Image: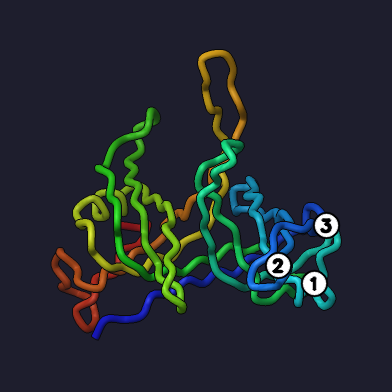
Amino acid sequence: MEEKDCNQIILRGTVERAPTFSHLSHQERFYLFPLSVERLSGNRDVLNVQLPGRLLPQSPVTPGEEVEVRGSLRTFNNRSGVGAKLVITVLAEAVTPSCLPHVNQLTLRGTICRLGAARRTPLGREICDFTLAVNRRYGRSDYLPCIAWGSLAQRCAGLGVGSRLTLEGRLQSRGYTKQYPDHSEERVAYECSAMALVPEEPPFSTVGTEKGVAAWDVKG
């Protein structure tokens, strides 16, 4: 029996700015604030959190405050022509104070709808990118750009469009320069970085795994 799609994220980090009004949907106001989450390397991901208005009075979202956010990822296409075309935000279901270390834990289960070939970066590291379609409860889907590295990239490239898998990893931000004929712009892209992949119908040997499920992780 095919498992239902899954879209869950837990973030612990520092509120960068106070929430500002974003949009109105189904008669509810939504607010947006950036959350800075430190990686083990010391680098930081600055991620946009979408907060429903009903949670605003009870949520600690003062700049500089340490909080934990639990929710899911949401995507929409930016048609304004300003900034990245695909916008990814974290839709918060709960925001609470936290004194624990920063964390960025993402779990997705969905269907591959676009798959790139494995390639190497200029520094020689293997990489493979793909898009994972994750259904929401009420009929819409989020199309999430994902990236796998090293041995995971090799194995991911062996899958096909339509394959279902579970991804564990993190949501990361990445700065880049958009070049135009007469100028350039600094932009930020967001993507799901895979730390482990579990295909539902693995195309590789399942020797040594339980119940016929081959789990791939970054240790290879």
Query: What residue sits right under mark 1 in the picture?
Result: 56
Tags 2 and 1 touching, CB below 8 Å: yes
At label 2, the amino acid type is: Leu
Q: As drawn, which residue projects farthest toward the front?
A: 27
At label 1, the amino acid type is: Leu
Q: What label does residue 167 carry, if any?
A: none
Left/right placement of residue 191 relative to residue 14 reads left
Q: Mark 2 or 1 closer to N-term? A: 2
Task: Tell me the crowding category of disc 3: few under 14, some 14 to 19, or many 20 or more residues within 10 angstroms, Cα based.
Answer: some
Query: What residue sits right under mark 3 in the picture?
Result: 18
- Work out how far the residue at label 3 is from the one at label 2, CA to CA, in angstroms: 11 Å
Query: Which one is nearer the viewer's eye here, 42 or 52?
Result: 52
Quarter of the picture holding the C terminus: bottom left
At label 3, the amino acid type is: Ala
Please state the horizontal and vertical placement of residue 174, each as a whole percent of the image.
Answer: 55, 41
Query: What residue sits right under mark 2 in the picture?
Result: 51
Left/right placement of residue 78 relative to residue 17 reads left
Query: Which one is nearer the viewer's eye here, 83 or 147?
Result: 83
Q: As drawn, which residue projects farthest toward the bottom?
A: 1
Compared to residue 34, the image places residue 2 above or below, namely below
Q: Residue at x 51, y 57 (%)?
A: 75
Q: Mark 3 or 2 closer to N-term? A: 3
Compared to residue 111, the image places residue 182 above or below, namely above
Q: Residue at x 35, y 68 (%)?
A: 110
Q: Mark 3 or 1 closer to N-term? A: 3
Q: Residue at x 35, y 47 (%)?
A: 129
Quarter of the picture holding the N terminus: bottom left
Please state the horizontal and vertical placement of residue 154, each as a whole percent of the image.
Answer: 25, 49
The picture quadrant where one finds residue 12 is bottom right
